Image (cartoon, rainbow, N blue to C red):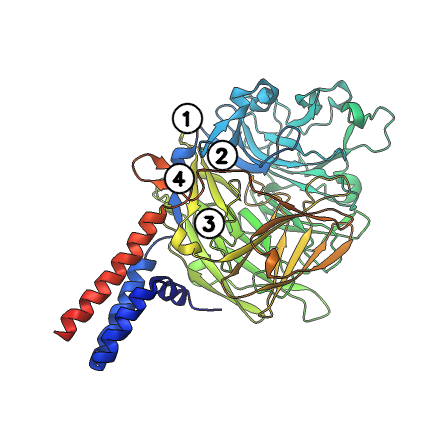
Amino acid sequence: MACPWTFEIMRIFSASSARFLVMTLLGRFPRVWPAFMLSLLWSVAVASAQGMFKDWSSVMPHGTSQLNYGVAVTNVGDGDGPMEWVVAGFSGANLVLQYDSRTGRYRNVAEEDRRYAALKDSQGAAIGVCACDIDGDGLEEIYFLNTNNRYSGPKLVRDRLFKWRNNRYEDLFSDDVNANVSSMYSGRSVACVDRTGSGKYGILLATYAQDGEGKFGLIEMNEYHSMNDVQRGRIVLHNVAQAVGINFSTGGRGITVGPIIGDDGFSDIYFVNEGNMRLGNRGDNSLFVNDGQGRFTNMAAQTNLNDAQPGRGVTLADFNNDGKTDIVYGNWMGPHRLQIQDASYSQTTFFDAATQEFATASPIRTVIAADFDNTGTLQVFMNNIVYRGSAENKLFRILPEGASVGIVREDIGDALEPVQHGTGAAVADIDQDGVLELMVAHGESKSQGLTFYHVTQSRVKDNNWLRVMPLTQYGAPARGAKVSLRLSDGRTLTRIIDGGSGYLCEMEPVAHFGTGMDAEIRELKVVWPDNHKITKTLNQGDVNKMMVISHTGDFREIKPVENKNRGVYDTKKGPGGRDSTISQALSSSTALVLMLAFLVVTIT
């Protein structure tokens, strides 16, 4: 991969007139070459000295300042248009933030549109949120885990499972037939799993037990109940956790789901837990491996994943591009882990590749792995919460190095947030410009508004990208699917469609690939949770597109919505798209002028 400074040099000398002037000077005065190189490197450093994220929080609506927790990305209502951010409100209403391409701003449709009003659920004290299609109607239901202000043990308020029916959202747990299904124990994270590959999902619950009361849950549609009527939205639910082998009792914290072990596509589940002797909870993490029939066995000890540190945020990724699923997670005031899968022996195991800086203890909450700048390498975003002093967020770039990885600390830019009480975060490309946006929620001990970030334009440059959303047999997002992209330089990039991760959160159900400036795309492969596989040959004409892939293999391109605000930044009026083209040109021109001035001074 080309050095990032190479891209800056190309950008600075993109103007032929500037190149001609510089080369003329160097031709006439060859003794200034050393001075020229020094000034060039200095100019590039100036042009590159921008952090990853720019603060765009002014596009958020008023009224988001409260105690917020988890963030999920889904398509609300009838499934049309771009996706929305759904935020779990703890001290107030849940939020549903929809992008308005005409204004470049977000609005809270739960407040403005009565069809979404039920989602607010102001009394629930929600903490975790996720979305997936539980009944096979092609639309994602939305699950809120409510705590009712309980840290552990029994609670008084039911969770909510909202379904789009009768042209509005209604709670399935409020139906008489489901009155006794909702978990009545405090919990933390929720996530979605299609354990049998049927295209219908269950909701995983990381409950926080007390004295053995409150086991992990798995809420699914009761397929064989005579009272089901999917067409009318009548869905009978049941908890199958005990039947499938995950009714574990401990201090559940984070969950992530996907094809972790093997290449069969079946979804496995990894829980990061928290021990508490006073509450009778053991602390070791759990890896529930799918047997292909939808039943699970805890294999954490055999795979070296039974860490007993107090876990928080967790997510899946292939960090070293070997096609195997790796796991990254943060431990509360303990060492953070970057677990790389090693399948070189008969028994699959994981080893911790975290450097000392990466592992440094912090009051960690959400952990996200994504390619923010479209270079083709993943970054890990660590969201911390103020605890006994300031706590900065961190960003690390993970570089593949054979069977392991290298780790480099990145300048996080405006997303440092040293005095923010971070509780949740998610990523998505809602404005459809091919670059991920980052939303961070805050709260717990202090009401704070949502923060929202774009990637700094100079970081993205002219890097290419491809976005892929596989669908289930019923046309809903195929959360838990594995998507791989082979490039012309020999690399194969892999992404897992998120069904719940971070901590209390769920990312967009899209495989986002950055491919850099030079590599061309060659082949795409999708593996669904039922082990169904599709491979498609691609060419460079397919780059910088959003593709949707049906379970039968039909490909279609999604055209971006018209967005007059994309690519515009007015420093007087505030953000309406990405960074200003003018400001970017000025930064490049300034660097070039300074470099030429240095040459003239040297010559004379």
Question: What element does badge 1 sit on?
Answer: loop
Q: Is residue 385 left or right of residue 123?
A: left
20 versus 226 height, above or below: below
Q: Position of residue 115 (x, y in %)?
A: 61, 20
- Label 1 to label 4: alpha-carbon separation: 14 Å
Q: Which residue is mark 3?
A: 382
Cα distance, mark 2 to mark 1?
Answer: 18 Å
Looking at the picture, tell me which residue is in the foreground, 498 or 552: 552
Residue 300 in sight: no
At 64% from the left and 58% from the top, the residue drawn is: 325
Q: Looking at the picture, how far across and down is residue 460, in whole percent?
A: 44, 55
Determine crowd level at label 2: few under 14, some 14-19, many 20+ residues with C-alpha closer than 10 A: some
Specify which label sits upstream in the sequence, 3 or 1: 1
Q: Look at the numbered disc 3 and give the secondary structure of its residue.
A: strand
Q: Of the residues under marks 2 and 4, which one precedes in the sequence?
A: 4
Quarter of the image for residue 508 reads: top right
Residue plotted at (36% across, 50% down): 413
- Say whether disc 1 or disc 4 marks the residue closer to the N-terminus: 4
- Does residue 62 sit above or below 530 in this rendering? above
Mark nearer the N terminus (3 vs 2): 2
> Total label count?
4
Name the residue that disc number 2 marks.
101
**Which label was assigned to residue 56?**
4
Give the distance between the C-alpha atoms of the residues marked 2 and 4, in whole angstroms.
15 Å
Rate crowding at label 1 as few (under 14), some (14 to 19) or many (20 or more) other CA atoms within 10 Å: few
Disc 1: which residue? 62
> Which residue: 76% across, 56% down?
533
Which of the 4 image quarters holds residue 47?
bottom left
Kind of residue indicated by mark 4: Trp
